[in-house]
Amino acid sequence: MDIGDVLYKYGAGAHNFLERSKSNLSKFKENGDVAALLYSALDLRFGIEARLNEYICAAAEYLGRMDICGKEYVASKLMKNLGKLCPEHSKERIQLMRFDDMVFSSRYTPVTKELASIHGRLGELLHHSFFVKNPNCAYKRKVVKNQFVTIDDSVPLIEKGIELLEYATSGNLLFSSLFTQTVSTLINELDEHKD
């Protein structure tokens, strides 16, 4: 039996969602396929959640706290949970490792507050209420010149989200033990006081 007979091919990591978002945005720009634009926004939203969860789950595994991994989907709450695990999660870091005469570098690139807020703003587009509140949204912006909200108005938001998610996924380090060292010490102290 071939693996394709058993499993669907679908990457659910931040990089996978980012690539699908970019591809769908290109389809929208090429032929005006509104469904592709909506899928671009959805994949971008998934990508933001995925990257935050990748960071949280890596730190949670290191700390032995897998109970918090994958339990949230709101970006602001994910950022808060990440902050509890990794107090310095919002700063880019470069970590150097030496092995004999070779030096390796790893880079942590954070999910920014702006990217987390874009996650929430994309949600407004991805509900039916968007179409109810904006009955003229199908008009093309070049025709109606800022008279009301159109589908085209979401393109800059999606483009900015893609740019910021590209940055957040450009690093090759999901977390640094230096980030979680303080939290780990606190958890150990709390555990000692329980007894």
Image (spheres, rainbow, N blue to C red):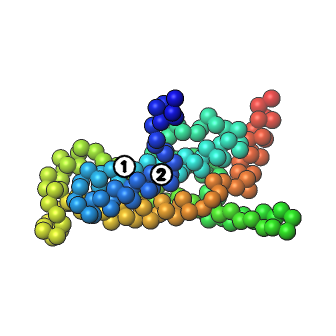
**Residue 133 visible (yes or no):** yes
Q: Against 20, is 30 above or below?
A: below
What residue is shown at x 22% (from left), y 59% (from top)?
Answer: 32
Q: In the image shown, does 175 or 103 lie closer to the viewer?
A: 103
**Residue 124 visible (yes or no):** no
What residue is shown at x 20% (from left), y 49% (from top)?
Answer: 131
Q: Against 145, is 135 above or below?
A: above
User: So how many labels did they put on this image?
Assistant: 2
Where disc 2 sits, the SS reads: helix
Q: Against 100, is 79 above or below?
A: above
* 2 or 1: tag closer to the N-terminus: 2
Residue 53 lies, in percent from the top left, at: 55, 46
**Quadrant (top left/top right/bottom left/bottom right) for the C terminus:** top right
Q: Is residue 127 left or right of residue 180?
A: left
Residue 93 lies, in percent from the top left, at: 66, 64
Q: Is residue 179 left or right of residue 141?
A: right
Amino acid type assigned to the residue bearing label 2 in the image: Asn
What residue is shown at x 29% (from left), y 55% (from top)?
Answer: 37
The residue mark sitting in front, 2 or 1, is: 2
Q: What is the crowding at mark 1: few (fewer than 14 residues within 10 Å), some, or many (at least 20)?
A: many
Q: What is the crowding at mark 2: few (fewer than 14 residues within 10 Å), some, or many (at least 20)?
A: some
Q: Residue most toward the front?
A: 1
Q: In the image shown, does 137 or 37 lie closer to the viewer?
A: 37
What residue is shown at x 40% (from left), y 65% (from top)?
Answer: 160
Q: Is residue 166 left or right of residue 21?
A: right
Q: Circle 2 sits on which residue?
A: 16
Q: Circle 1 sits on which residue?
A: 42
Amino acid type assigned to the residue bearing label 1 in the image: Leu
